[in-house]
Image (cartoon, rainbow, N blue to C red):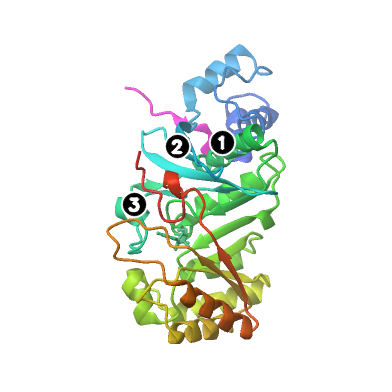
């Protein structure tokens, strides 16, 4: 009977140390292997040249290293790069590199598909296949860091969890990946340069606050009126705005970190004065800012970007109320790499 080998990168450093001790070797060997796996990015046990041949064979007998593989890389005319990433079980997720003059941002996926059902998002149509492991999330970041150095001559500067999936529904693995990304043994990035974006799972937002996480929080709000929000993000019926609001107040009180609300304005859906007024009220519950994002059409035109007058109204009313607002243009639309367009299309 063939023994199913374990993904070695699912083990913590302590677990690796224990493994070596149980095998009658020095615990320190675990540190060496850990370093090979994470800071040196070894793809095979053969690469681990400071281990004896026997040790490498022993690892080979017990474990596999499940590296992702960038199958297809597409470059947009605006410099955006989209990676189609193949996982060890042949499923595919996408990640995006977004360059600006001074930064390179990686937009990474946390799940294969998504279990939420936002009506305006292409990923929602894929359904959730499975959660990504910490190393599959980490590898997406490493791949983009490499591309950033290659094409833009600088390392990756920021990470947003705004690719496929709902990060708070794969919270433990996202947290483990961020631990690796921020640890000196991994990429040594500052958590302040990482944004986790959620549709708003109140219980998990509170848990994050209790865990005293240091990264930033963005919430895809899109409407501060329950009825409207439920019509475009049906899970809002389960997690209504009152619960979300309570969790966000809790988050701010514990972390003192301002929240970013992501917001798309659609014609005939949330482009009226009452929608802006509700948003202003919502923003007053906890210190926050609003990021108005452009709509990236995904289908037959059920949703349409609001007229510029509506966006201007949002901007002026928010500013009158001393709420910071930024209007963000989409990148990478020509290669289906913009927000909400990730759907494993060729
Ligand atoms: N599930 C997480 C992260 C993935 S979505 C979340 O909901 O935040 C990343 C962002 O893209 C979210 O703000 C989402 O609302 C937005 N988005 C989804 N579809 C979009 C579309 N077609 N056009 C513009 N933004 C979209």
Q: Image check: 284 left or right of 167?
A: right
Snapshot quadrant of residue 185: top right
Write down the residue under mark 1: 143
Q: Where is ligand 1, by quadrant?
A: bottom left
Mark 3, ligand 1, within 8 Å: the answer is no
Q: Is residue 92 covered in magenta?
A: no
The residue drawn where x is 50% and y is 41% is 76
Write down the residue under mark 2: 85
- Disc 2, disc 3: CB below 8 Å? no
Q: How many callouts does the rendering have?
A: 3
Q: Is residue 6 covered in magenta?
A: yes
Q: Nearer the viewer, mark 2 or mark 3?
A: 2
- Mark linked to residue 128: 3
Residue 86 vertical position relative to residue 194 in the rendered view, above or below: above
Where, quadrant-wise, is the C terminus in this rendering? top left
- Disc 1, disc 2: CB below 8 Å? yes
- Which element carries disc 3, helix, strand or loop? loop
The residue drawn where x is 58% and y is 64% is 217
Label 3 Cα crowd, 10 Å radius (few <14 / some 14-19 / many 20+): some
Snapshot quadrant of residue 50: top right
Residue 55 vertical position relative to residue 252 in the rendered view, above or below: above
How far, Cα to Cα, is label 2 from label 3? 16 Å
Residue 332: where, in percent of width, then height? 49, 48
The reply to whether residue 179 is in sight is: yes
Mark 1, ligand 1, within 8 Å: the answer is no
Which of pointers 2 and 3 lies earlier in the amino acid sequence?
2
In the image, which residues are magenta?
A: 1-11
- Which element carries disc 2, helix, strand or loop? strand
How far, Cα to Cα, is label 1 from label 2? 10 Å
- Which element carries disc 1, helix, strand or loop? helix
Instruction: Work out whether residue 231 or residue 15 is closer to the camera in this orientation and state it.
Output: 231
């Amino acid at each position: 009977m063939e023994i199913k080998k374990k993904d070695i990168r699912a083990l913590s450093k302590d677990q690796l140390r224990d493994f070596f001790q149980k095998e009658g070797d020095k615990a320190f060997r675990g540190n060496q292997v850990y370093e090979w796996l994470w800071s040196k990015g070894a793809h095979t046990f053969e690469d681990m040249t400071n281990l004896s041949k026997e040790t490498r064979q022993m690892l080979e007998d017990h474990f596999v290293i499940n590296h992702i593989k960038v199958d297809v890389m597409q470059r947009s005319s605006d410099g955006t790069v989209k990676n189609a990433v193949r996982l060890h079980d042949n499923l595919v997720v996408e990640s995006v590199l977004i360059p600006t003059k001074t930064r390179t941002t990686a937009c990474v996926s946390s799940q294969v598909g998504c279990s939420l059902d936002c009506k305006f998002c292409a990923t929602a149509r894929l359904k959730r296949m499975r959660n990504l492991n910490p190393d599959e999330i980490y590898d997406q970041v490493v791949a983009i860091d490499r591309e950033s150095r290659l094409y833009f001559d600088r390392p990756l500067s920021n990470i947003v969890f705004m690719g496929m999936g709902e990060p708070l529904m794969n919270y433990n693995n996202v947290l483990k990946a961020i631990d690796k990304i921020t640890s000196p043994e991994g990429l040594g990035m500052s958590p302040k340069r990482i944004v986790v974006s959620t549709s708003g799972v109140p219980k998990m937002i509170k848990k994050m606050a209790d865990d005293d996480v240091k990264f930033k929080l963005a919430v895809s709000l899109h409407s501060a009126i329950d009825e409207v929000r439920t019509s475009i993000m049906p899970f809002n019926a389960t997690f209504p705005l009152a619960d979300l609001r309570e969790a966000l107040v809790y988050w701010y009180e514990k972390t003192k970190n301002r929240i970013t609300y992501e917001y798309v304005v659609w014609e005939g859906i949330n482009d009226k004065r009452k929608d802006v007024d509700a948003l202003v009220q919502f923003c007053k519950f906890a210190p926050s800012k609003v990021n108005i994002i452009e709509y990236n059409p995904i289908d037959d035109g059920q949703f349409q970007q609001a007229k510029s007058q509506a966006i201007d109204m949002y901007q002026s009313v928010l500013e009158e109320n001393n709420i910071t607002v930024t209007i963000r243009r989409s990148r990478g639309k020509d290669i289906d790499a913009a927000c909400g367009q990730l759907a494993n299309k060729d």
